[in-house]
Each structure stands twice: as structure tokens, then as C-alpha cells.
Amino acid sequence: MEAGEAITFEEAMKKLESIVETLGEGNLSLEDSLKMFEEGMELCKFCNKKLDEAEYKVEKLMEKEGGEISREEFKVEE
């Protein structure tokens, strides 16, 4: 991800999935793997930030509507 590059959450997730797949193949040099890993970490931070922002917006909307917010642990099905 280049500095100042505008990217959507969906594009970042797609790129992150591609990076994980490429790294999983194990065909890159150590240097290229490290560069790709670094890019993946930046994308991961970006996605986490976007998810935090979305969660905040939802909580604010729920509060506006008088809804009660209850937190539950999110479980991913494998």
C-alpha cells in the first residue's frame, strides 16, 4: 500500500488475502517475503482501523435510537 493511496476496506481485504496466499506458497525469497509481510501488516492495521470506526458508528447510531448495546464475543466458524 503506497503512502497516500486511497483504498477501500474491501480492496484491502482482497489484497491481504492475496498476500497470505502468496506467502503460503513459499516461493518468494526471504527479502520479498519480508516486504510482502510488511505490506500485509499495514493492510491489517488499516482494516482493523476501519472496523473500529464502523463499530463506533454503529454504537453511536444505536445510542441515538435508544437501543441498548450489549457486547458479545464474536466467534468465527471454521
Image: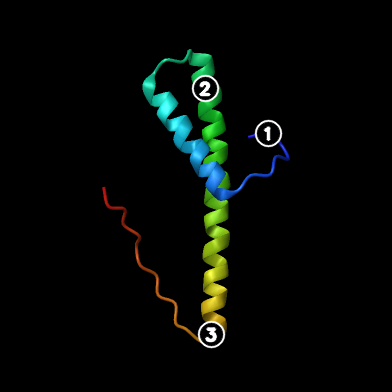
Label located before the other in sequence (3 or 1): 1
Residue sitting farthest toward the right: 4
Query: Residue at the location (56% across, 31% down)?
Result: 39
Q: Which mark is residue 58?
A: none
Residue 74 drawn at (x, y percent): 35, 60
The local secondary structure at tag 2 comes to helix
Cα separation between marks 3 and 2? 47 Å
User: Residue drawn 56% across and 66% down?
Assistant: 56
Identify residue for label 3.
65
**Is 56 rendered above or below residue 2?**
below
Instruction: Give the residue number, with chain letter if any, for mark 1.
Output: 2
* Left or right of residue 29, residue 60 in this image: right
How far separated are the C-alphas under marks 3 and 1? 39 Å
In terms of sequence position, does the residue under pointer 2 or pointer 1 come before the other?
A: 1
Amino acid at pointer 2: Leu
Which residue bears the numbered disc 2?
A: 34
Residue 73 vs 24, above or below: the answer is below
Q: Give the amino acid type for the residue marked by disc 3 in the picture.
A: Glu
